[in-house]
Image (cartoon, helix red, strand yellow):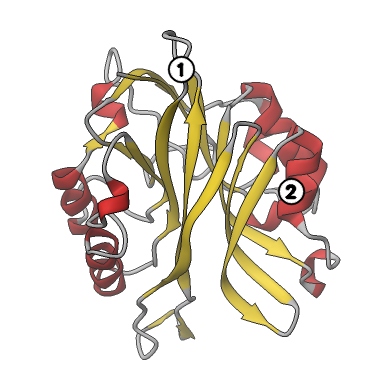
Amino acid sequence: MARIMTYNVHSCRGTDGKLDVARIAAVIAQSKPDIVALQEVDVRRPRTGRVDQAHAIAERLGMHFHFNAALGVADERYGDALLTALPMTLVKAGALPNLPRVKVRGRGLEDRGAVWVQIEVPCPSGKPKKLQVINTHLGLVPPEQKVQTEALAGPDWLGSKAAKGPLILIGDFNATPRYACYKRLAGLLKDARKLAPGKPGCPTFPSRLPMIRIDHAFVSDGVQIDGVHAPDTALARVASDHLPLVVDFTLG
């Protein structure tokens, strides 16, 4: 059995307003995941002390990582990362389409992207199996979620020949199960929550009083779900505005 976590770290700024990379790493370490998908990671941004958060978190966990910058200005970066101590190969990292003229609360929408790696996961047979993992963070409103979801479903991502075999699509989708983008992805893959024993709800947002499910893990055939939970510890409630979502799985 292996364990994967998705975690929107909110640039490592907690609900108490404190910026603390070590605290985020501690929340992750408590769950002992084999694979970690992070969203809202800052790299050398002035607002977070020019720390390379992807590197700093990976170093604390004894993992290596691949980072995709959804936003980049000069040497500043902001985006998503995949971390693991298992053998990992980058397959693809890139942007997802956006609707720049659409505004939310008077602000232009953020650029979005995804990062895809292949990981060799240990199996009971003794021979590692190759697992495809795609980490993403979709936009805030349905029109952009629609074009981003169609891009993920298309030939560059889930429709690619390289996407054959066991696959997990994971991240912050900014969408509950009622949203069209969730239904589209759940039609291509399966929601890990629904495959888990007991079908746990596991809301992840907001972290202080989690009520909604917007962080998801979608899996292909060949990925057996052994359990899903959202660590609701005192530390997790304050470290970010999301709780992590943790999925235990076995490759069949």
Q: For residue 207, say whether it is visible.
A: no
Name the mark on residue 127.
1
Residue 19 vs residue 84, the one in the foreground: 84
Where does label 2 land, which residue? 16
Where is residue 50? Give x, y as percent.
83, 68
Tell me the residue at 33%/22% (across/down).
200
**Quadrant of the rendered image containing residue 100:** bottom left
Secondary structure, mark 1, is loop
Residue 130 vs residue 94, the one in the foreground: 130
Q: Which residue is at the far left? A: 187
Amino acid under label 1? Lys
Q: Is residue 73 left or right of residue 56?
A: left
Q: Quadrant of the C terminus?
A: top left
Q: Does 138 sit above or below residue 227?
A: below
Q: Which residue is at the far front? A: 127
Q: Is residue 90 left or right of residue 175?
A: right
Tell me the residue at 17%/49% (across/down).
183
Amino acid under label 2? Asp
Where is residue 219? Give x, y as percent.
29, 35
Secondary structure, mark 2, is loop
> CA gap, disc 1 to disc 2?
45 Å
- Looking at the image, is mark 1 or mark 2 earlier in the sequence? 2
State if disc 2 and disc 1 touch (CB < 8 Å).
no
**Quadrant of the rendered image containing residue 159:** bottom left
Where is residue 60? Give x, y as percent.
80, 37
Dot 1 crowding, Cα within 10 Å, few <14, some 14–19, many 20+? few
Residue 201 vs residue 139, the one in the foreground: 139
Tell me the residue at 17%/53% (across/down).
184
